[in-house]
Image (spheres, grey):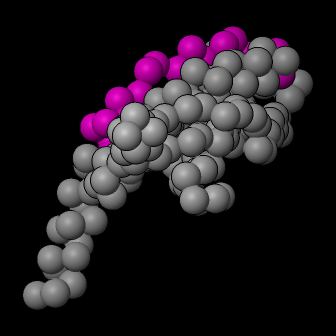
């Protein structure tokens, strides 16, 4: 009976964290180092997940940072940094909606500090000032994406 009770309780365990893809480009170096530093930072963030086994999931957090520099109207790309930070998670005993939220918000929240560190490391190696990306509220992003999907589903039906 104790075994049945343990099997029914939700389980969550991080199995592995790894970099799936990493890229840094600085197309205007070394000329960009001569320019006054007035950066404009654009962050694109995306998450995806896939089931590996019955209760094992891979979650991938993708960050693309494009930094342009120069005066307004004549900005050029200083650098482009991309990372796909991934993790394998054991997730067991959750209802479907809880599972979706765990994979869409909780797991990316665990991966983000690793992705941020990878980005900062690349940027420093490229001889640029560190970015120090602000924390991201993955719960809010997940809820926003879910609301948009529901609205699009309603609009498609009408």
Q: Does 66 sit left or right of 72 as displayed?
A: right
Q: Decide which of 95, 141 is in the foreground and name it.
A: 95
Q: Residue furthest left?
A: 158
Does residue 73 lie above or below 29 as drawn? below
Q: Position of residue 43 (x, y in %)?
A: 52, 37
User: Eyeballing the image, is 77 above or below 155?
Assistant: above
Q: Residue at x 86, y 29 (%)?
A: 29
In this rendering, does residue 33 appear at all?
no
Q: Residue furthest front?
A: 1
Camera-side residue of 119 and 26: 119
Q: Is residue 22 above or below residue 145?
A: above
Residue extending farthest right = 30
Q: Is the N terminus in the top left, top right, bottom left or bottom right quadrant?
A: top left
The residue segment tinted magenta is 126-142
What residue do we see at 65% from left, 42% from top? 88
- Please tell me whether the stretch drawn in magenta is mainly helix, strand or loop: loop
Where residue 136 appears, as percent x and y from the top left, is 41, 28
Q: Position of residue 138 (x, y in %)?
A: 38, 35
Q: Is residue 55 magenta?
A: no
Q: What residue appears at the point 69 percent right and 12 percent down from the top-left corner?
A: 129
Q: In the image, residue 101 lies at what x, y percent?
A: 35, 46
Q: Is residue 151 left or right of residue 71?
A: left
């Amino acid at each position: 009976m104790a075994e049945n009770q343990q099997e029914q309780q939700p389980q969550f365990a991080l199995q592995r964290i790894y970099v799936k893809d990493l890229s840094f480009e600085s197309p205007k170096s070394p000329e960009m180092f001569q320019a006054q530093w007035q950066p404009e930072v654009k962050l694109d963030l995306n998450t995806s997940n896939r089931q590996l086994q019955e209760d094992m999931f891979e979650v991938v957090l993708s960050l693309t940072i494009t930094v342009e520099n120069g005066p307004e109207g004549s900005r050029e790309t200083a650098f482009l940094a991309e990372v796909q930070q991934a993790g394998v998670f054991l997730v067991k005993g959750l209802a479907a909606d809880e599972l979706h939220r765990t994979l869409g918000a909780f797991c990316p929240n665990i991966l983000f500090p690793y992705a941020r560190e990878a980005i900062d490391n690349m940027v420093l190696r490229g001889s640029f000032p560190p970015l120090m990306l602000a924390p991201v509220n993955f719960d809010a992003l997940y809820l926003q994406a879910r609301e948009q999907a529901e609205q699009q589903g309603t609009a498609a039906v009408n």
